[in-house]
Amino acid sequence: MLAQKVLLGETNGYRNHPQLNRFKALQNPVSVIRRYLYFVYEEAVARNYNFGLSKIGVSRSKVRIEVSNGQIAFETKHLLEKLRSRDAESYSKSISIACFKPHPIFDVVEGNVADWEIIK
């Protein structure tokens, strides 16, 4: 939700977060982030989490975003490191997953981690 606010110019924080660059580079980043958030909403519903669909807005975007398999590996390692220090139970469940499924708007391509894609 914060990413959508950043792209709408409704916040001063996180405006230069590296993960937003892939959205900022698109022709209609707000529409794409809304589509991204809709899939997050669907996952939240499946997990019985409370997620405000009305806060997302409508998107007709069909844009797909390429992400390298190196980036997926980097972010998987980053997630597991965070879980290990913050949530031992989730870490124990997640460490055995051989390959995390990427978000539905991403097309995974062969490649390394791009400098602008690295979470710092």
Image (spheres, grey):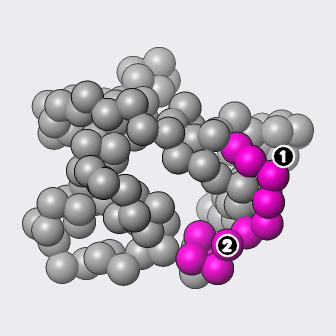
Q: Is residue 29 visible?
A: yes
Magenta stretch: includes residue 114: yes
Identify the amino acid type marked 1: Ile
SS for tag 1? Answer: loop
Q: Residue at x 14, y 68 (%)?
A: 9
SS for tag 2? Answer: loop
Q: Is residue 81 visible?
A: no
Q: Is residue 62 above or below residue 85?
A: above
Q: Residue at x 43, y 68 (%)?
A: 21
1 vs 2, front mark: 2
Magenta stretch: includes residue 104: no
**Which residue has dot 2 on it?**
114
Q: Residue at x 42, y 38 (%)?
A: 63
Depth check, front residue: 88 or 114: 114
**Which residue has dot 1 on it?**
95
Q: Is residue 100 above or below residue 113?
A: above
Identify the amino acid type marked 2: Ala
Task: Tell me which segment is drawn in magenta.
Answer: 108-118
Q: Quadrant of the C terminus?
A: bottom right
- Marks 1 and 2 sit apart, C-alpha to C-alpha, by 25 Å
